[in-house]
Amino acid sequence: MYENLFQPIQVGGVSIPNRIVRSAHGTLLTGEAAIAYHEARARGGVGMITLEATSVHRKAPSSVPLYSDDVLPYYRAISQRIHAHGTVLFQQIYHPGASYGARAEEAWSASAVPNYMQGVVPFAMTQAQIDEVVDAFAKAARRCRDGGLDGVDVHASSGYLLHEFLSPALNHRTDRYGGSLENRMRFLDEVLAAIRAEVNDADFVVGVRLPNEDQVPGGLGAEEVAEIAARLNDRVDYVSLHMGSYWRFHTLIAPTDDPLGVEMAANAKITPRVTKPTIVVGRINTLDHASSIVASGQADMVSMVRALLADPELVNKARRGEENRIRPCIGTNIGCVGQIMSGHPLSCVVNPAAARETILTFEAEDTVTTPKTILIVGGGPAGLEAARTAARRGHRVLLYEAGQRLGGQVAVAAAAPHRADVGAIVSFLIEEIESLPVEVHLNSPVDADVVAAIDPDEVIIATGTTPRYDGFQVSTPGAPVPGFDLPHVVNAWQLFGHGEPVKIRGPAVVYDDTGSYEAISACDALLKAGVHVTMVSRFEGIGASVPFPPVTVEASRERLMSSDFDFIGGHYLRAITSDAVEIGVLYTPRVRRLPAATVVVVSFNEPNRELVTTLNPGNRYGVHLAGDVQGRNGIMNAIHSGAALGRRL
């Protein structure tokens, strides 16, 4: 299958062995951790890897000192390791421009337009500064060549310096670098010419990344980018396209809210103008999708960044005809860019080994010498991951689930509008344990007597949580919300079909006590039913507890705000009546009254810890907790904690 993806392609002076590539993305990794992360994807068969955007200029430094010859030992080490697997290695080079303003002594840009996220007003670059940066790009490319890399990816997208010069919204100059398209391209033209002159090597690849649409109001649209790409065609070896900028951050890394292949409509206006090889990205999660893009001529190569983060063996598995064994990306952005933008190294919701390759193999590779009987209670993602991992290592695994199906809260979440993708991971895990000697028991609650009858060596309790029905909210933990037990007051699980069907009437109020996706999904479901919705949250923003909302929940916010929807932040529930909700700001006397015929309260669930209490302490079993029952909610913790137990026991 996918024979077209496994055909080599000539790009400049190098041959890329297949059409699945891995474009640049942030990791916050350095040294051996970074090398091991990239090498895992090379070992997995990806045709080309581009290292993350690295600054060429010492006044806006990156963690890798590309502005100095000190970088050469690192480059020689990583290029040797990557090339050993037949993978081509590029480095994305850039200057961050105004986006670096909060960390730099001086922020440089085309014009003094404040950066959207940081609010820093940059300096409009002088001619001397432009010349200095052009020279820095050239010397950086030479260091990449001398370090054994195969080429550079000149980053002129994502709202960084070269993009700021290209964009009519960000470039207000009146000199030879502003105004007309020819002038706005001048800086990039000079950079490309200087690189070619400095490197002077026909085999060294020089590519460019452009924004197919930059999503800056008044900025670059696909039609103008098509003209830019056409003018650059004879000066570069390939063109890589990527949507977005920090003005609309989530378009840079499209979440599950966006359709698969979200960038292809814009790309279609650009790639016909280019004769050099093209690379596209944007929610391309499967080999089938990638194959159709290449087969139809929409692009020559497909970058699958998050899919390769979730499963570094993606290419090799596809070659072996094991596409069903590929661990799927579910597109939440919580584990990858959400972690990075929160100041933590790269991670992945579904792959605990991602960016931890120095301490964890992708799969547990050891086989136990003394198999144990392991009882796992709960068939959500934590229990499924623990069962899969333990069984692969040779343990006897019994999985008991009290409900009629496996999947836990992920199955609930996947039933909500715009959240179907999250269900892919439990489908994968279920199929995996079906191929392993795991005894699965549905409709099977577990108590101490059941445990005693099984007499396991270890018990993993992954019983998750269930909604509370006592009117609890965090703002007033000592007293329930008056009116919580009225018949038109429900929780999100009931809204999504658990229990008696909910009769939805408008207007509706959703109270968000957790700052998670749950309240967003409740609003989506109510809006789909055709009623006006007001979300009231104790937080100041929608989805405030999700890591880095601009890239995780902002797409949801845009969708909600485009609907019959209002948001009120920083309030708590004072009372619920038969036809209204009374809200207020904590420690203040003012009361606001919102009409409400349907009220959905999204508060913290109750961990199902009855079995924990029964078995601990003083029992003869090893008892371990995984997932939400620990009190740390979320699918990332569920999968990671389940995998950790499956590897450790």
Image (cartoon, helix red, strand yellow):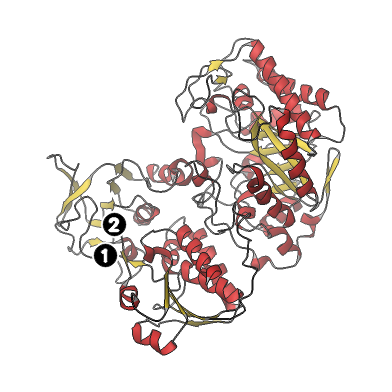
Query: Tag 1 or tag 2, which sits nearer the N-term?
Result: 1
- Judging by the rendered image, the residue that carries numbered circle 1 is 468
- Residues under numbered marks 2 and 1 in contact, where contact means CB atoms less than 8 Å apart: yes
Q: Which mark is residue 432?
A: none
Whether residue 428 is visible, yes or no, is yes
Seen at 50% across and 63% down, the residue is 639
Mark 2 belongs to which amino acid?
A: Ser
Snapshot quadrant of residue 233: top right
Pinpoint residue 73: horizontal percent, then vertical percent.
74, 37
Callout 1: SS: loop
Above or below 134: residue 277: below
Seen at 29% across and 57% down, the residue is 603
Above or below 427: residue 398: below
Q: Residue furthest bottom?
A: 453
Mark 1 belongs to which amino acid?
A: Arg
- Give the crowd class for mark 2: few <14, some 14-19, many >=20 residues within 10 Å: many
Seen at 64% across and 14% down, the residue is 129
Q: Nearer the viewer, residue 586 or 416?
A: 586
Pinpoint residue 200: horizontal percent, then vertical percent.
86, 27
Whether residue 211 is visible, yes or no, is no
- Judging by the rendered image, the residue that carries numbered circle 2 is 603
Pinpoint residue 94: horizontal percent, then vertical percent.
65, 30
